[in-house]
Image (cartoon, helix red, strand yellow):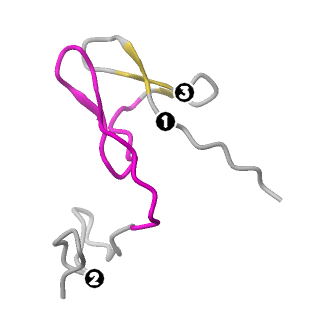
Amino acid sequence: MYNKDQQVLGAKNEYGKKYQPRDNGQRVSEVMCLCGHRICDSEGIIGSRCVKLLEGEALSRCKRWVKVPVVKKLSK
C-alpha cells in the first residue's frame, strides 16, 4: 500500500524497524547551503550532525552555519 508520497506503508528502515511515513500536514521549503548540500528536506528533517536549536542553525559539509526551521514546543 502506498501513501500520497509513494512510500510503502509499514516498510522497514535501514535498521530493520518498521516506520510509518510522517505526514502532519506541515511542509517546509528545502534548505540548501551555498555549497549545494541539502541541509533540510521538504518534510523538515535536518540532515546535519550539529544543530544549534536555540539559534536555529545547522552545520553544513563546508563548515558554514545555515539557518533552518526549528519548531520550539513547550512540554507540559
Which residue was labeled with disc 1? 69
Task: Please name the amino acid that badge 1 sits on.
Answer: Pro
Between marks 3 and 2, how big is the CA–CA gap? Answer: 32 Å
SS at mark 3 in the image: loop
- The residue drawn where x is 31% and y is 20% is 60
Q: Classify the position of the C terminus by image quarter.
A: bottom right
Q: Which mark is residue 20?
A: none
Residue at (59, 43) in percent of width and height: 71
Left of 1 or right of it: where is 43? Answer: right
- Is the C-beta separation of discs 1 and 3 under 8 Å? yes
What is the span of residues highlighted in magenta in the rendered image?
A: 23-49
Question: Where 1 sits versus 29, above or below?
Answer: below
Q: Give 28 or 60, whichever is nearer the viewer.
A: 28
Q: Residue at x 64, y 27 (%)?
A: 54
Kindly identify which numbered label has been placed on residue 10.
2
* Horizontal and vertical percent position of residue 68: 45, 30
State the residue position of label 3.
Answer: 56
